[in-house]
Image (cartoon, rainbow, N blue to C red):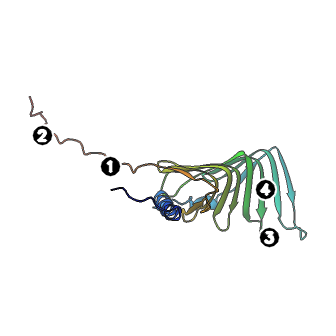
């Protein structure tokens, strides 16, 4: 006896549940960016820069172009262009990187390196939210990888979101199996000789 086919809405709902489970498996236990990175100086290099102050002569925006490189602790970013936003106290609040692709990598608290490429990376330093768009690829060393048009990643919690229920965006993930513990070495006889001889 054959099973009747599922309706498209049932298949779509089941598919969404499966994607949610896969995403949960990919990010749990959550990997977080090294918190100590925020306490490091931000080293910025580029071919051109323009600093625009606010009307009150307070820090505003810094525009960078040409081989932009930003390093803060273990966080490394490369882009064709970047905009750095600062608050009145001079703290960096947001960094927007653009390129073909812009690249970002950072060491995680639990170990492992996360690398991401996208045409635009918009990182809010206050909330820890990174929004990546345009040919996004994110690889978490030893855990898995993600490919899609858009992704939002919370560097504080490890939460990740991408795609939509309409089916307009496709999400592709590769999840690595957990490494199995190494088998214990065979025990040697107490007298140090091999009993098989």
Q: Residue 54: x percent and y percent?
A: 87, 67
Quadrant in which residue 40 is drawn: bottom right
Do labels 1 and 2 touch, CB within 8 Å? no
Dot placed on the residue nearer the N-terminal end, 1 or 2: 1
In the structure shown, which secondary structural element does the residue marked by tag 4 occupy? strand
**CB-based contact (under 8 Å), mark 2 and mark 3:** no
Using the numbered discs, state the Cα–Cα distance from disc 4 to disc 3 in whole angstroms.
Answer: 16 Å
Q: Distance between the residues labelled 2 and 4?
A: 67 Å
Q: Distance from label 4 to label 1 (Cα)?
A: 45 Å
User: Mark number for residue 88?
Assistant: 3
N-terminal of the pair, mark 4 or mark 1, is: 4
Label 1, label 2: how far apart the Cα atoms are: 24 Å
Mark positioned earlier in the residue sequence (2 or 3): 3
Residue at which label 4 appears: 83
Q: Which residue lies furthest to the top in this view?
A: 197
* Category of crowding for the residue at label 3, using alpha-carbon neighbours closer than 10 angstroms: few (below 14), some (14–19), many (at least 20): few
The kind of secondary structure element at disc 2 is: loop
Q: Which of marks 1 and 3 is nearer the N terminus?
A: 3
- Residue at the disc numbered 2: 189
Q: Gap between marks 2 and 3, in whole Å?
A: 71 Å
Q: Does dot 1 land on a helix, a strand or a loop?
A: loop
- Nearer the observer, disc 1 or disc 2? 1
Residue 181 badge:
1
The mark nearer the N terminus, 4 or 3, is 4
The C terminus - image quarter? top left
């Amino acid at each position: 006896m054959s099973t009747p086919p599922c309706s498209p809405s049932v298949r779509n709902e089941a598919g969404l549940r499966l994607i949610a489970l896969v995403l949960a498996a990919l990010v749990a236990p959550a990997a977080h960016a090294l918190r100590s990175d925020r306490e490091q100086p931000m080293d910025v290099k580029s071919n051109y820069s323009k600093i625009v102050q606010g009307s009150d002569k307070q820090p505003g925006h810094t525009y960078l172009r040409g081989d932009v490189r930003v390093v803060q602790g273990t966080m490394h970013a490369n882009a064709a262009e970047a905009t750095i936003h600062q608050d009145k106290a001079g703290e960096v609040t947001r960094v927007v990187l653009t390129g073909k692709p812009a690249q970002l990598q950072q060491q995680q608290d639990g170990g492992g390196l996360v690398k991401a490429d996208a045409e635009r990376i918009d990182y809010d330093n206050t909330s820890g939210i990174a929004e990546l768009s345009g040919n996004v690829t994110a690889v978490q060393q030893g855990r898995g990888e993600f490919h899609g048009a858009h992704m939002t990643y919370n560097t504080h919690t490890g939460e990740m979101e991408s795609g939509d229920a309409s089916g307009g965006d496709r999400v592709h993930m590769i999840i690595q199996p957990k490494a199995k513990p190494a088998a214990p070495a065979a025990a040697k006889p107490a007298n140090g000789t091999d009993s098989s001889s």
